[in-house]
Image: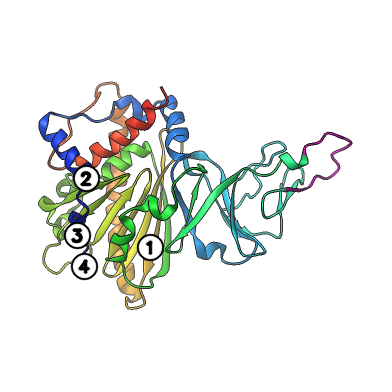
Amino acid sequence: MASAGRWANDLDGGIKERMEAATVWALPARWYADPDIYRIERRRIFSRHWLWIGREDEVAEPGQYITAAPAEFPLFVRRSEEGALHGFHNVCRHRASKLLTEPSGQCAAIECPYHGWRYRSDGTLDHVPLFGEAPDFPKDELSLFPISVDVWRGQVFVCLDPEAPPLIEWLGPIEDAVEGSAPAHPKFGRHLEFVVDCNWKTYVDNYQEGYHIPPLHPGLNRDLDWKRYRVVNFEGGSLHEAPTKGSSTHPGAFGWRFPHFAFNSYPDGLSFMRMEPVGPRQTRLVYDYWRPDSVSMEDFEATLEYGVQVSKEDQWITPLIQENLEAGVYEAGPLSPLHENGVFYFHELVREAVDSAA
């Protein structure tokens, strides 16, 4: 297992000093349901970071596309006839209809199902049927709204901010962590999705600490030396480290990148995960599991079942937390300097984004 400790840095040391110098507090409870806070998060967080939306093998052939709606931004990525990947907001420039309505597919042209407006692969407006006479019609100004697209390890990422850093730079030490722990040349195994009745931050909070492992995750508690669970924060994310007990092969290297991307790398597999908001009170969990050739389908299914069980345990507790965050009793709680430095750093990133909108 790759050690997260090698990424210890001034940022993480500063967080440790702050948490040991005085009690630090979690985000205000109202931030977990307030529609105004959610609107700020969409614009100040999810529109400014790289977002994982799918696999490159889903758009391998010309005309193939995938659609997504992270934080309710309708988007699509399509492979052009020339072989390039292009990404756009999935919004027709005429009357705002969605252009591509399936999760994935293949189309010879980008044509709106509402009034038939057609766009070229590069997003420029190509054909407007039976529109009528309009001599000043600004056809050249009605291209689709573009987004950035890049691929990392077969995963398609998009970014709505044209000034964002390159994807590989944004990933930071995650690249080396995966390189040092993931099986070579894994093949896609399974795609799973769940919708959980909690704010996206409630679920990320849960991901960012191992403090809850003994009472909530009996399987992980059996396989991990949870008292040595460690989170090392880097600029924009965290790497997690948890020594295994005995000969367990389940735990490995895992980590998170603000705002919603996570990976889990095991000796017998690799998974990617995203925790994307569906409004202020629901979160969509998306998992892709990958299997190396050296692992049998039987062993892969066992690893998959293990991972899903852990997720189900988290999916059980997080809606209960959400209910209490909205009950009007709890306002904020203290964060453990021993176990919750990852939660604290996540909250600092959220605070910075929300406060920048003031």
Q: Quadrant of the C terminus?
A: top left
Cα distance, mark 1 to mark 3? Answer: 22 Å
The question of residue 237 being in magenta is answered with no
> Which residue was labeled with disc 4?
249
Q: Earlier in the sequence, mark 4 or mark 2?
A: 2
Residue 89 lies left or right of residue 140; in this view the side is left
Residue type beneath disc 2: Glu
- Depth check: 49 or 329 in front? 49
* Label 3: which secondary element: loop
| Amino acid at pointer 3 | Ser
- Classify mark 2: residues with Cα within 10 Å, few (<14), some (14-19) or many (20+): many
- Residue drawn at (37%, 39%) of the image: 200
Q: Which residues are magenta?
A: 125-138
Seen from the viewer's position, the closer of residues 346 and 5 is 5
Residue 105: percent from left, percent from top: 61, 59
Spatial CA span between label 2 and label 1: 22 Å
Q: Which mark is residue 289?
A: 1
Q: Earlier in the sequence, mark 1 or mark 3?
A: 3
Specify the quadrant of the image occupied by residue 323. Answer: top left
- Mark 3 or 2 closer to N-term? 3
User: Could you tell me how far apart the alpha carbons at marks 4 and 1 are, in whole angstroms?
Assistant: 16 Å
Up-down: is 133 above or below 257? above
The residue indicated by pointer 2 is 209
